[in-house]
Amino acid sequence: MIAVTGASGFLGGAVARALLRRGDQVRCLQRSDVPDLRALGAEVARCDLADAAAVKQALTGCTAVLHIAAKAGVWGPPAEFWQANVAGTQHVIDACLQLGIARLVYTSTPSVIHAGGDVEGIDESAAISKHFSAPYPHTKAVAEQAVLAANGPALATVALRPHLIWGPGDTQLTARVLQRARAGRLRMVGGGVKLIDSVYIDNAVHAHLLALDQLKPGAACAGKAYFVTQGAPIAQKDLINGMLAAAGLPPCQASVSPRLAWLAGAVLEGIWHLLRRREEPPMTRFLAEQLATAHWYDIRAIRRDLGYEPRVTLEQGLELLARSLKGPPPSP
């Protein structure tokens, strides 16, 4: 039995479906139900990862865990991110050790090493950042370090850092780009010329299955973190305009300077704090930094240790996205 946390999300659901397709027994752990996965044969254990006893009970009988669940976003109370991302991950680690579960694949993020400037062609030897502009990357960094520190003879662990996952069904990156474009609020920061990496959803899933299948005590990947991307960085504007074209929308021509975006984020954060608003502001300092800087990575390590190669190219992914956005053909 393989446990998947966060199967109600974009990546977690895709990983669970891939496991079911190849015949694995799957148990999905999250607070909400996933009737579509249940219909495919998955077990569903509804629990809050912040509840250590509930996590242990839900993982009883499992042989491996893909821990994908997380509180993501660029805004929110730090305590909520800490509870979900740090405490929840520690409860998963503890349950694995107590129950004799031998494999733990953790979904991290490249933003754990992002200190606000350009990140160009670095590999996994880069240190975890000491500067974080938001609680999400901070708590993910703490959780990643806990997972890798737990690696040993009893529990083999690995952390994957997929960057900007997108594709059909994406409710985050793709959906937000299209929503802002349709509302006339989409702007390129600095003209969108900085190079960035991304990863199509099927490729992110492929990396997770490779890690799961090869992970064991003493394996080449055990105790390590890996970037997961298309392996082909492009200008930010090319990815965004590719998504817009897939939706039949015109390319984005508007742009703001990186400094103006950062200042807008700082001002909006102050207003949101003052008004105690819980929804994300249109811009934050962390988001401005992400949009204004290059971030692409050397993925030779995951190619070497796991045999990872992107199965879907950027061009193929955009075509698949376009087909999905067109929807099913009308009934005759």
Image (cartoon, rainbow, N blue to C red):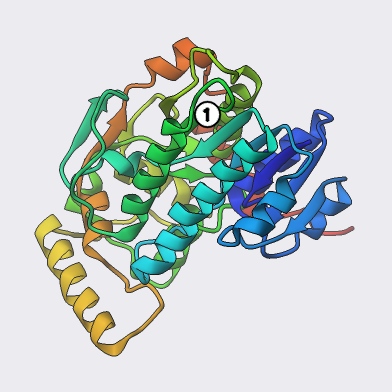
Could one spot residue 8 in this view of the protein?
no
- Left or right, 315 with respect to 188, comes to right
Q: Quadrant of the C terminus?
A: bottom right
Q: Residue at x 60, y 36 (%)?
A: 97
Please give the residue where the numbered disc 1 appears in the rendered image: 157
Residue 10, compared with residue 78, is above or below; it is: above
- Left or right, 327 with respect to 118, comes to right
The x and y percentages for residue 315 are 50, 32
Quadrant in the picture for residue 224: top left
Could one spot residue 222 in this view of the protein?
yes
Residue 284, compared with residue 87, is above or below; it is: below
Q: Residue at x 46, y 66 (%)?
A: 179
Total labels: the figure holds 1
The x and y percentages for residue 32 are 70, 65
Residues 117 and 324: in front is 117
Q: Quadrant of the N terminus?
A: top right
The x and y percentages for residue 208 are 58, 31
- Left or right, 207 with respect to 82, comes to right
Residue kind at label 1, given as amino acid type = Thr
- The crowding category of the residue bearing disc 1, from other C-alpha atoms within 10 Å (few below 14, some 14 to 19, many at least 20), is many
Residues 307 and 146: in front is 146
Q: Residue at x 33, y 33 (%)?
A: 234
Residue 317, compared with residue 265, is above or below; it is: above
Residue lying at the far front of the rendered structure? 98
Q: Secondary structure at mark 1?
A: strand
The x and y percentages for residue 108 are 44, 41
Q: Residue at x 52, y 18 (%)?
A: 309
Residue lying at the far bottom of the rendered structure? 275
